Image: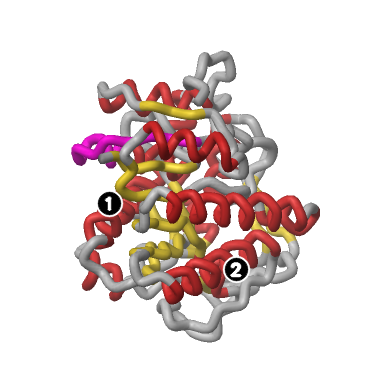
Amino acid sequence: MAILVTGGAGYIGSHTCVELIQAGYDIVVVDNLCNSHKEAIHRVSELTNQSFTTYHIDLMDRELLELVFAKHDIEAVIHFAGLKAVGESVERPMKYYRQNLYSTIVLCEVMEKFGVYQLIFSSSATVYGIPKQMPIDEDAPLGAINPYGRTKQMIEQMLQDLAHANPHWRISLLRYFNPVGAHESGRIGEDPGGVPNNLLPFIAQVAIGRRKEVAVFGNDYDTIDGTGVRDYIHVVDLALGHLKALSKLSESSNLQVYNLGTGRGYSVLEMIAAYEKASGRKIPYRIASRRPGDIGLCYANTAKANAELGWRTERGIDEMCRDSWRWQSMNPNGYKQEEVFAEQV
């Protein structure tokens, strides 16, 4: 029996593959490489001293996906695959609706065809939109404010309807807050294409000299220093949350929702200061205007995941920045591009 990991060459997917293999799971990876890197797969194999089957296919290709299920005895699926850039989703919404929604529809239909009913879905705290209170718990109203977040919210609703219609399904919806950091080896990490959308990889690229300065969007929020506060979670803690959710699937009820965060927030200036400490380098920044839709404060209530999954984060801001800097300093230009990849179905 194997775990199918869609998007396993991506940032969170690759770290989860490492933890799955080290926990004794057999894995099969499917990735179309549209926003990930072949080299990450090789490094996962290197870190774990294990080989595994990887297919370079798109989930929307039903015929090829069915061949993967026919070739392997799949027990459960962890579904990371999808487009994820908020800014691009605003500029090209139909691309996001088509890719994220349709790929999940095809995946679920193929799973049903082959009698595979255990699914962990990579969701996001963006489904909460502009929250009314802190911390945010799983029962908070949903109201995503950009196309990326809306695709996550729509998929969640689709999976809830699916679970209601067919009691065989066991589904966990994992709502991530702000994944950061890298594997402690420095061999795998976050390698965004183009200008980073998220704070920490941008800080890292300033520290390594690829960018001039960090733009701090707003310093007049009602927070500790006026800058935005977010719940940052180390990517390895996040990966381990998937293993806890996976082990819980078979004994849980039809569908469960869990926040994965630390339960506390750090401001932009606190993150910059922590990164300066980790890297030993000055991080220049400038104050810019608030961005439309940004909020001052956002952090998770993690009590449900703590109690039901037996999961807690173990790595704080120092480890997040330390591991991010190790990855960035060892890989100043991210992953190399000249790799050989995968077998075809």
What residue is rendered at 26% in x and 22% in y? Answer: 49
Q: Position of residue 169 (x, y in %)?
A: 36, 65
The residue type indicated by label 2 comes to Met
Q: Nearer the viewer, residue 234 or 286?
A: 234
Q: Can you tell which quarter of the image residue 293 is in?
A: bottom right
Label for residue 243? Answer: 1
Q: Is residue 34 left or right of residue 204?
A: right
The vertical placement of 253 against 181, above or below, is below
Q: Which tag is nearer the camera, tag 2 or tag 1?
A: 2
Label 2 secondary element: helix
Q: Position of residue 22 (x, y in %)?
A: 22, 36
Q: Where is residue 269 in the image (x, y as percent from the top left)?
A: 53, 58
Q: Position of residue 270 (x, y in %)?
A: 47, 58
Mark 2 sits on what residue?
Answer: 154
Q: Is residue 157 in sight in this rendering?
A: yes
> Does label 2 or label 1 sit earlier along the sequence?
2
* Magenta span: 18-30
Queried whether the magenta region covers residue 297, the answer comes back as no
